[in-house]
Amino acid sequence: MAEQNFDAIVIGSGISGGWAAKELTEKGLKVLMLERGRNIEHVKDYVNANKEAWDYPHHGRKTQEMIAQNPVLDRDYPLNEQTYGMWVNDKESPYVEVKRYDWFRGYHVGGRSLLWGRQSYRWSDLDFEANAKDGIAVDWPVRYKEIEPWYDYVERFAGISGNRDGLAVLPDGQFLPPMEMTCVEKDVAKRLQEYYKGQRAMIIGRTANLTKEIEGRSACQFRNKCWLGCPFGAYFSTQSSTLPAAMKTGNLTLRPWSIVTKILYDKDTKRATGVEVLDAETNKTYVYKSKIVFLNASTLNSAWILMNSATDVWEGGLGSSSGELGHNIMDHHLGVGAGGRVEGYEDKYTFGRRANGIYIPRYQNIGNDKRDYLRGFGYQGGGNRGGWGSNVAEATIGAAFKEAISEPGGWSMGIMGFGEVLPDHKNFVTLDKTVKDKWGLNVLKIDAELKDNELKMRKDMQADAIEMLTNAGVKDVRGYDANGVLGRGIHEMGTARMGADPKTSVVNKYNQIWDAPNVFVTDGSFMTSAACVNPSLTYMAFTARAVDYAVSELKKGNL
């Protein structure tokens, strides 16, 4: 790469990195976006997007060889033949677990924007004020009103479908038309509304899947193959949305296979000067200079980069002066809920394969609802008709078999909780001094676990699910708890928290690192608390806001 100097460098190409690149380039800056993994081009490289189960040698299932190479991925759904190669190889990129932590990573252009669940919810002041009211960690230095216009802005561009439900706990947004609930979901929603006298709601999920065509992107085809990459551009990803916009400006240089090993810092100017990059293919080292740096490598990797950027000024890394860098790891705990069968509706069926479900917003510790723990949870799930497989067990061959497979199974309804994890200084990451990855770099050591508050909450997540489904007329309701483990939600947050005081936080209200004001952190690292809703929309909003501020400050000569 001939050019070594840029106006801005963006580290990471996932949801927040893509947004940073788009906003910076559209404001006229020359931008270098660095991605540690391979390039994936929109449409061309979605190699499995049009395959069905029978097109795979092992029908989409994981093999013994895959399990041997990926012991962490094997703990949950990411390990399968369909998405193999999209998630990080555990053997090449290990990490040390002091306590079990399921870390699922996507090292390629687009990052986990190609693999995310796409549920997109705004925070409310209930969330932004929670730390202050509960006396937990530090207060958010912003409130909903400050972020509201940025939610508006990113929703319009990303394309979020949903219904305007008028719920204080879950602010409405700039939505495309909502997807439709199934007949069972509609009836269950009505029964819950009546039984709980409007205190609990069940709504269609708000998702980054288009229900109407927008520029350069088609509406959702109801294939439910989003995790394989969408040739129609029907869901928001870096490839379908922010990268084309950034490329259109002519101001973006994209460099894959680029592992950022440190942010370079000048102690005289108290500013970052650029980054050091290890080429993942050649193992050669390069230096790129810039006026500003946006760090969007994902929560844990961003912490790694900052820690690895230690100088004689800060032994603990860039941004470590408060003692909070690497601490306060959060996620959402899940894998607990209930399900059962629904009688009737035999003359009804579903339309296509809806890449969405229902959502029950948080109702705990709101108004008169008081629990013996802080914060709360929401539920995701759905009511669907079973496949023909449920009718085949007793069939053999011949007419009985043919008759069985021509009829769909019965209806069922299930919901799974997503619970808030409190920020806790004792949940943290450090650099391990002994274990190295494929490139000879020290890896992260993760020491984090669910605490008493989350464990208490899980009991209610199961009990309430059973109670609500039963009250809604669902039969044979059974609860489950698959043990909560941090990381499994793939919503890691918190290692460089935002705050109003440089003594207790890593970044300020504009996502600037206190110790280096021309470095901005806008991935999940900056989150001061976690709420109980999917966080990606909030990363988008804060990223767009931070870029607006950064460019303004740059023009004023303050950076």
Image (tube, rainbow, N blue to C red):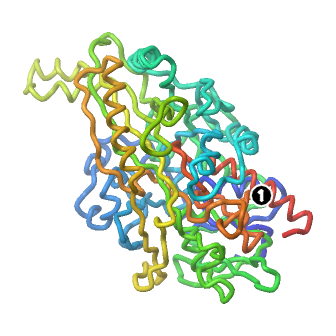
Helix, strand or loop at label 1? It is: helix
Q: Residue furthest bottom?
A: 312
Give whichever of 164, 326 is nearer the camera.
326
Dot 1 alpha-carbon crowd within 10 angstroms: few under 14, some 14 to 19, many 20 or more: many
Left or right, 413 with respect to 427, comes to left
Left or right, 210 with respect to 415, comes to right
Residue 176 in the image: state x and y as whole percent.
64, 28
Left or right, 418 with respect to 166, comes to left
Dividing the picture into quarters, in which one does residue 165 lie? top right
Give whichever of 72, 558 is nearer the camera.
558
Image quadrant for the C terminus?
Answer: bottom right
At 42% from the left and 42% from the top, the residue drawn is 372
Residue under label 1, please give it.
24
Residue 257 in the image: state x and y as whole percent.
56, 71
* 333 over 165 or under it: above or below: below
Residue 539 in the image: state x and y as whole percent.
63, 51
* 195 over 236 or under it: above or below: above
* 414 over 183 or under it: above or below: below
Image quadrant for the N terminus?
Answer: bottom right
> Does residue 2 appear anywhere in the picture?
no
At 72% from the left and 53% from the top, the residue drawn is 22
- Number of labels in the image equals 1
At label 1, the amino acid type is: Leu
Dividing the picture into quarters, in which one does residue 464 lie? top left
Left or right, 253 with respect to 80, comes to right
* 170 over 384 or under it: above or below: below
At 68% from the left and 50% from the top, the residue drawn is 244
